[in-house]
Amino acid sequence: MSGIAEIASQILTSSERRLEVVSNNVANTGTAGFKKEVSFNDILAASAASNGLSPSNLATTAPSRALPELNSFTSFETGRLVRTNNALDMALTGDGFFMISKGSDSFYTRNGQFSLDADGHVVTPQGYFLQNSAGAPIRLPHDNVEILPNGTILDDGLPIAEIGVFTPDNAQSMTRLGGTRFSLIAGDGSMPQSDNPGLQQGMIEAANVTLSDEMVEMMAAIRQAETGANLVRMYDTMLGQAISTFGQNSR
């Protein structure tokens, strides 16, 4: 019977994690460059569908404790582009990331909302400095500039800086640090420059979150939690019956 309790606990823990993922995705639907999380349950379901299997059958054969780090993963699917007409707003149509820094720490992001600070540095709303192709902060005389698809910044037709756009060999080698910031899981924290960043000036990339999909996932997580709760009730009933039977036999 202890196996039933363990299974119920795993189911409830998994459903709680799924609800946390949905909640975080929905809360960031308005965050530019946000990349949604997808639960491991969805990965199993997609794999099952592609192989003509039942998702429930596949899920039961997957050892949940063997891959605890895969409770969820980040979907780097490109979000839709939204025009803002702000000169320093930028969207990436390729697979790259902007590099931003604060102090000695550097991070990667798809959030292309930038502005100039009092010293002329191109910064995020949180004060992180946008880096050029050499990994140094970009400083501009004003924001009335032209930005080419390859990241070159022109002032009165002359190049004055080049925005660094970097592409990981494998996007899943990155780890989310919070919001839209990422870093590399291993290595020296750097990645090669993108050959084709496809940068679009005056636009931002919206979050790749679809509310209808999140609502479906939420309902699935609730049903999963109900299954776990039913197993707990069944375990309590069986335990009560076992205690009652033991008490009668011991008389």
Image: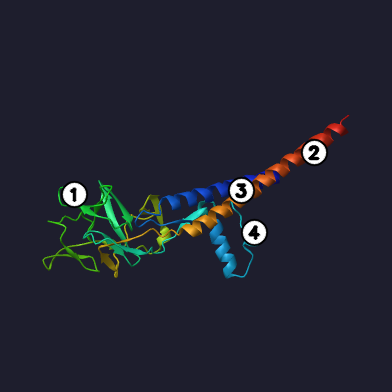
Crowding around mark 3 (Cα neighbors within 10 Å: few <14, some 14 to 19, many 20+) is many
Q: Is residue 52 left or right of residue 134?
A: right
The answer to whether residue 239 shows anywhere in this view is yes
Residue at 31% x, 64% y is 92
Residue ID for mark 4: 61
Q: Earlier in the sequence, mark 2 or mark 1?
A: 1
Q: Nearer the viewer, mark 2 or mark 4?
A: 2
Residue at 43% x, 59% y is 172
Question: Residue 230's x, y, as percent?
Answer: 68, 46
Q: Which mark is residue 225?
A: 3
Q: Give, as a three-letter code, the residue at label 2.
A: Gln
Residue ID for mark 2: 241
Q: Earlier in the sequence, mark 3 or mark 4?
A: 4
Crowding around mark 2 (Cα neighbors within 10 Å: few <14, some 14 to 19, many 20+) is few
Question: Residue 216's x, y, as percent?
Answer: 54, 57
Q: Contact, CB < 8 Å: mark 1 with mark 3? A: no
Question: Residue 243's x, y, as percent?
Answer: 79, 35
- Give the CA distance from mark 3 to mark 4: 19 Å
- Give the CA distance from mark 1 to mark 4: 54 Å
Q: Which mark is residue 117?
A: 1
Q: Give, as a three-letter code, the residue at label 4.
A: Thr
Secondary structure type for disc 2: helix
Secondary structure type for disc 1: loop
Q: Nearer the viewer, mark 1 or mark 4?
A: 1
Secondary structure type for disc 3: helix
- Give the CA distance from mark 2 to mark 4: 30 Å
